[in-house]
Image (cartoon, rainbow, N blue to C red):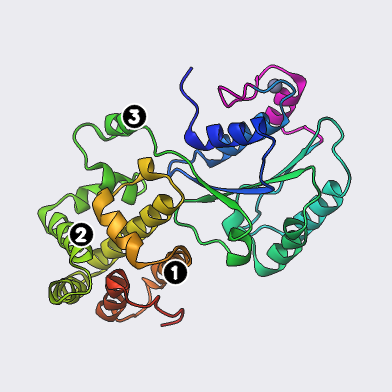
Amino acid sequence: MPEAPPHMLFIARAMKRGRLAHAYLLFAGEYGALERELTALARLLLCSSPDLAGAAGCGRCGACRKVDHSTHPDLAWIGSEGGQVRIDAVKEFRSQVAFPPLAGERRVAVFPDAHRLNVESANAMLKVLEEPPPYLVFLLGAPQGASILKTIRSRCHLLFSPRPDDAAITGQAGGEVDMALLRMAHGDMAKVGLWSSPVYSNFKERFLRMVEAGDSPEGLLLALTLAQECGADEDGFGFMVHLSACLARDVLALRAGAEAFLVLPERVVRLAASRAGFSEVSDYVSWLSGISLLQDRNINRQFMLEKLLLFWLGGAVPAVGN
Ligand SMILES: [Zn+2]
């Protein structure tokens, strides 16, 4: 049996000590593992004889089977529809969790698309998240790098799922691949091909050197020349946005104690983390996901990249809409 991932062990330890938090937010691996991992966590929390050392539900009891078949009466699974978590679904969840559990000692509410809560549904959900009944555990999920409303994020214990199995992906890619590029491209092999070229390797090298140089003449020069060269076309622009998002995600992972999951060199990530706080980096990630949507529009790419890069030299989080 493969060893349980760190976030599962973390929750199993909390259960053993009777110190479960009310809410966990899991940032999942890039390869669609989120639902599977949330189901495994729900099984662990609801199982009638969980294996806390192995961090797993037994997989055989009635509770585990009902979780697998989505028929457990104490499990509320609030997914999204049409790209949004609907207010009706949140209202239904609220009436459901107003009563103590029917089968075991706790209820579990899973929001696998926490990044798709709109303001209205988030507000309805916050009413419970702010003062949850003692028997309720929230499991929120989102893809890595997704932006989550600050009001929600701040009430959750953050967890990061492990990186995908390197061997499996390298096999899929057929040979030697730069793992950092593969993760940055979310497994899109066409992008990996493009980004492996000498031009992009050079961009990446200089970006890392820029972060190391920090707020110095060298760092500034690197930022401005990179903005100019990468801003020259759509592909270069997209590459820099992805690379910056990757560093931001690594900084968040580092601050959550998940050093083992870093994609970029740890030395560089530590330097970046020493210059920007958790909430600044989270705001920066939100801004970044906003500009990737703007990519088709007629924007001044070079100007955007200057702001994007200067952040890593200790600059301010660029304002939304700029
Ligand atoms: Zn079980």
Task: Work out whether residue 120 or residue 191 is closer to the camera in this orientation and state it.
Answer: 120
- Measured in 3D between alpha carbons, the distance from the residue under mark 3 to the one under mark 2, in whole angstroms, is 27 Å
The segment highlighted magenta reads: 51-73
Q: Image point 21% across, 47% down: which residue?
A: 193
The amino acid marked with disc number 2 is Leu
The residue under label 1 is: 280
Q: Is residue 54 left or right of residue 133?
A: left
- Measured in 3D between alpha carbons, the distance from the residue under mark 3 to the one under mark 1, in whole angstroms, is 34 Å
Residue that protrudes farthest toward the front in the picture = 17
The amino acid marked with disc number 3 is Ala
Task: Work out whether residue 175 or residue 308 is closer to the camera in this orientation and state it.
Answer: 308
Q: Is residue 142 above or below residue 172?
A: below
Local packing at callout 2 (Cα closer than 10 Å; few below 14, some 14-19, many 20+) is many
Tell us which disc is closer to us: 3 or 2: 2
Residue that protrudes farthest toward the left in the picture = 198
Looking at the rendered structure, the secondary structure element under dot 2 is helix
The residue under label 3 is: 168
Looking at the rendered structure, the secondary structure element under dot 1 is helix
Task: Work out whether residue 280 or residue 121 is closer to the camera in this orientation and state it.
Answer: 280
Instruction: Report x, y in % for residue 102.
Output: 87, 34
Residue 45 in sight from this viewpoint: yes
The residue under label 2 is: 208
Q: Is residue 272 left or right of residue 48?
A: left
- Reply yes or no: does residue 62 show up in magenta: yes
Q: Is residue 275 above or below residue 261?
A: below
Local packing at callout 1 (Cα closer than 10 Å; few below 14, some 14-19, many 20+) is some
Which of the two discs, 1 and 2, labels the residue nearer the N terminus?
A: 2
Q: Is residue 204 above or below residue 69?
A: below
Which of the two discs, 3 and 1, labels the residue nearer the N terminus?
A: 3
Which of the two discs, 3 and 2, labels the residue nearer the N terminus?
A: 3
